Image: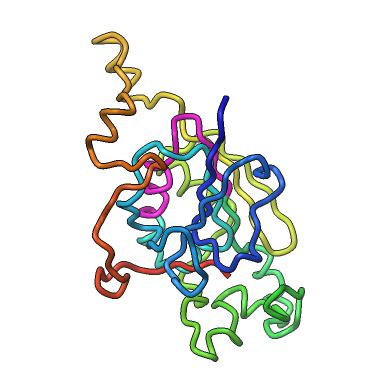
Amino acid sequence: MGLKYLLHAGCGSKTNKPPYEFAAYKEVRLDCNPQVAPDVVASIVAMPMIADASYDALFASHVLEHLYAHEVAMALLEFARVLKPGGKIMIQVPDLEAVGSRLALDQADHVVYTSHIGAITPLDILYGHQGSVGTGNLFMAHKTGFTRSVLKTRLQAAGFSKVELEREQFEIKARAHKPEVSDAQEERTGREGTVPREAPEEKAERGAAPNGHREVPERTLRETGLPCAAGG
């Protein structure tokens, strides 16, 4: 079957490893923060250096909450674009339902668990790790949030199917797939016959490198004005 590729979007530091279910995949690390030494420096809302349908899977852990609400759809559409048909996605975000239960008990500043960056309170989950933001790491600030229904609706709106959700210790985990054939393709296939797939040499002529990355001029995110959502 050949080697499968995983795009780790908003990877953060190299200590942030994808789940074991992706152990057989070749990981490509993408982040907007060059200080974490990713393989690709890019904002998840615009990844023009990555070719369409070039990854078998995508993993994004605690990244989407670092975007503004209107940017989430942009990121999810980019995720769908770079995934191959049938490709799978796993997303992890803070669980605002669980946070809300602690807020109702007036426990906003109580430690609820400890992570690799220190003690975490409901306020950290809502707004981003206060210690990191306080030392100038503004990448860690949270700008939006999710419940199960909100995340599922956003994924479906971006074209993902078979959405499954789990809740565990202040976290929502979503699994979904990019459909093998979109409704538009099915309709076109019914009218015109099989839609031809682009040959690898044709994709190369369009500027896609063999690893699925297009050669584009190197510019900083500040120069492009794109939002940054960095993993923790």
Q: Can residue 230 be seen in this view?
A: yes
Q: Is residue 92 magenta?
A: no
Position of residue 95 measured from the top left corner of the image (x, y, whole percent):
63, 62
| Quadrant assignment, res 132 | bottom right
Position of residue 174 measured from the top left corner of the image (x, y, whole percent):
60, 47
The residue depicted at 47 percent of the width and 40 percent of the height is 55
The residue depicted at 47 percent of the width and 76 percent of the height is 139
| Quadrant assignment, res 175 | top right
Position of residue 82 measured from the top left corner of the image (x, y, whole percent):
40, 42
Over which residues does the magenta segment extend? 73-90
Compared with residue 176, is residue 1 higher up or lower down, i.e. above or below? above
Compared with residue 134, is residue 141 higher up or lower down, i.e. above or below? above
The residue depicted at 57 percent of the width and 24 percent of the height is 1
Direction bottom: furthest residue: 135
The residue depicted at 62 percent of the width and 73 percent of the height is 125
Q: Can residue 150 be seen in this view?
A: no
Q: Is residue 31 left or right of residue 3?
A: left
What is the total number of numbered labels drawn onto the structure image? 0
Compared with residue 182, is residue 220 higher up or lower down, i.e. above or below? below
- Judging depth in this view, the residue of 84 and 145 nearest the camera is 84
Position of residue 169 measured from the top left corner of the image (x, y, whole percent):
74, 62
Q: Is residue 47 left or right of residue 130?
A: left
Q: In this view, does 163 lie to the left or right of 53?
A: right
- Judging depth in this view, the residue of 19 and 174 nearest the camera is 19
Q: Is residue 82 magenta?
A: yes
Query: On the rendered image, what quadrant is the C terminus found in?
Result: bottom right
